């Protein structure tokens, strides 16, 4: 609530003697300079303002706080702004533009996250990781100071230090952030404060790294040593997390799920009696119910007895579920001699399925690939029971390779 008092000549002695309002704020306008005033709040803070009609509406501009800004300085600033307004300028719009011109990469990222509320947890994790790794020294840099040359040099630097794929990933993220900023930050006239996206230099000069799509899988003869290494994680008495990661890796291999789909799976999504589970957090945002094989049912029953978390694969972090088991994956790689990524397990599942002639339609359904471009697929409904046999066949073949190869290794 604002209290209005009679206009008065604003001087230092007068401002010093002003009483503090019991609540809200009080305005005392100057008798000599129209629009110039001092504002006093209930907390005792005093500041100078200028009120003037701008673009047809009365606007209030804060000049500064007292005593950091003296009465004389405030009066001179008010005179200057009145001159600007008389020539058609808008001090509020100019101030806003000045602030926006200084928007840093971190500020833009924070605004980006506040707008993009539906980002998946894994995407959010990757974006934050890129800010801390690829652009840690740019976070406090104004976006309009990030040049095309800087982008080109940083892309090359990341390519050398962290690999071509990571360099491209970093710049795709930066490009998205600039596109957001171009649309988000406008001056008083509705024009973007950023004229162009500097990452476009990579496209214009064809400087993006050529990265072939990864096609690696765990080959049949590698499955036994890989499996033995995973099982050894269960025997880690020091870390309970190791046993959980072992189950997680096996679950990925025997379902072909994407790592985030499996990691965010909750016990409420599991129906052990019906021998099925439902994915609600899928990449294509379409829920999917799949059958549980005998192997998976046994794995989940053991896992359920060992945890009290709502997540099947619980994590130690704020999210509550497993995020990035890098340490355990590296242990398996070292013990087995089989290099792999989590997505390799999905490709291995698909490869095994194709090798035993699983129907293309059933296979697409199992891994939740869209079939919208296939007219025939639109007439086929693959329910849980129809997918149960294909899942059991894939499970049997994986376990066959575990046993066969382990026997061969012992001979």
Image (cartoon, helix red, strand yellow):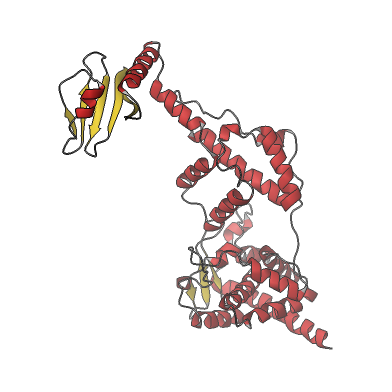
Where does the image place residue 30, in percent across and percent down from the top left? Answer: 23, 18
Give residue 24's position: percent from left, percent from top. 20, 37
The answer to which of 167 and 23 lies nearer the viewer is 23
Above or below: residue 188 compared with residue 234 = above
- In the picture, the quarter occupied by the C terminus is bottom right
Q: Position of residue 382 (x, y in %)?
A: 57, 67
In which image quadrant can residue 390 be found? bottom right
Residue 53 in view of the camera: yes
Above-or-below relation of 152 to 294: above
Quadrant including the N terminus: top left
Residue 59 can be seen in this image: no
Q: Position of residue 248 (x, y in %)?
A: 60, 72
* Residue beneath the point at 50% across and 41% down: 107
Q: How many marks?
A: 0
> Residue pushed farthest right?
411
| Depth order, front residue of 224/177 | 177
Asked if residue 183 is positioned above or below residue 233 in the image, the reply reads above
Which residue in the rendered view is the most extreme toward the front?
13
Q: Is residue 256 left or right of residue 94?
A: right
Q: Quadrant of residue 198?
A: top right
Q: Residue furthest top?
A: 87
Look at 59% across and 62% down and name the residue there.
368
Q: Is residue 258 left or right of residue 97?
A: right
In this rendering, would 260 be left or right of 203?
left
């Amino acid at each position: 609530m604002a209290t209005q008092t009679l206009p008065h000549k604003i001087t230092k002695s007068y401002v010093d003697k002003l009483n503090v309002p019991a609540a809200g704020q009080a305005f005392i306008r100057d008798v000599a300079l129209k629009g110039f005033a001092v504002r006093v709040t209930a907390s005792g803070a005093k500041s100078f303002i200028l009120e003037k009609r701008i673009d047809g509406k009365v606007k209030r501009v804060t000049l500064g706080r007292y005593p950091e800004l003296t009465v004389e300085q405030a009066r001179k600033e008010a005179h200057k702004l009145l001159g600007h307004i008389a020539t058609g300028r808008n001090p509020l719009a100019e101030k806003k533009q000045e602030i926006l011109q200084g928007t840093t990469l971190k500020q833009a990222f924070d605004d980006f996250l506040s707008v993009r509320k539906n980002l998946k947890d894994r995407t959010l994790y990757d974006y934050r990781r890129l800010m801390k790794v690829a652009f840690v020294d740019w976070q406090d840099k104004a976006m309009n100071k990030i040049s095309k040359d800087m982008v080109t040099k940083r892309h090359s630097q990341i390519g050398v230090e962290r690999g071509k794929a990571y360099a491209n990933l970093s710049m795709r993220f930066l490009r998205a952030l600039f596109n957001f900023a171009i649309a988000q930050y406008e001056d008083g006239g509705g024009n973007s404060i950023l004229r162009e996206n500097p990452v476009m230099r990579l496209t214009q000069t064809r400087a993006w790294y050529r990265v072939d799509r990864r096609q690696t899988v765990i080959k049949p003869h590698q499955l036994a040593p890989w499996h033995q290494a995973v099982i050894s994680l269960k025997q880690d008495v020091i870390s309970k997390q190791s046993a959980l990661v072992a189950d997680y890796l096996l679950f990925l291999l025997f379902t072909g799920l994407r790592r985030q789909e499996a990691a965010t799976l909750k016990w409420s999504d599991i129906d052990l009696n019906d021998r099925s589970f439902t994915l609600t957090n899928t990449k294509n945002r379409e829920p999917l119910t799949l059958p549980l094989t005998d192997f998976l049912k046994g794995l989940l029953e053991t896992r359920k007895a060992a945890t009290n978390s709502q997540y099947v694969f619980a994590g130690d972090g704020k999210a509550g579920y497993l995020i990035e088991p890098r340490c355990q994956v590296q242990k398996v790689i070292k013990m087995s001699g089989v290099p792999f990524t989590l997505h390799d397990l999905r490709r291995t599942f698909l490869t095994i399925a194709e090798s035993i002639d699983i129907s293309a339609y059933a296979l697409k359904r199992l891994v939740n690939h869209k079939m919208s471009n296939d007219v025939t697929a639109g007439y086929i409904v693959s329910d849980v029971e129809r997918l149960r046999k294909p899942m059991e066949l894939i499970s049997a073949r994986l376990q066959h390779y575990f046993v066969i190869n382990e026997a061969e290794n012992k001979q």
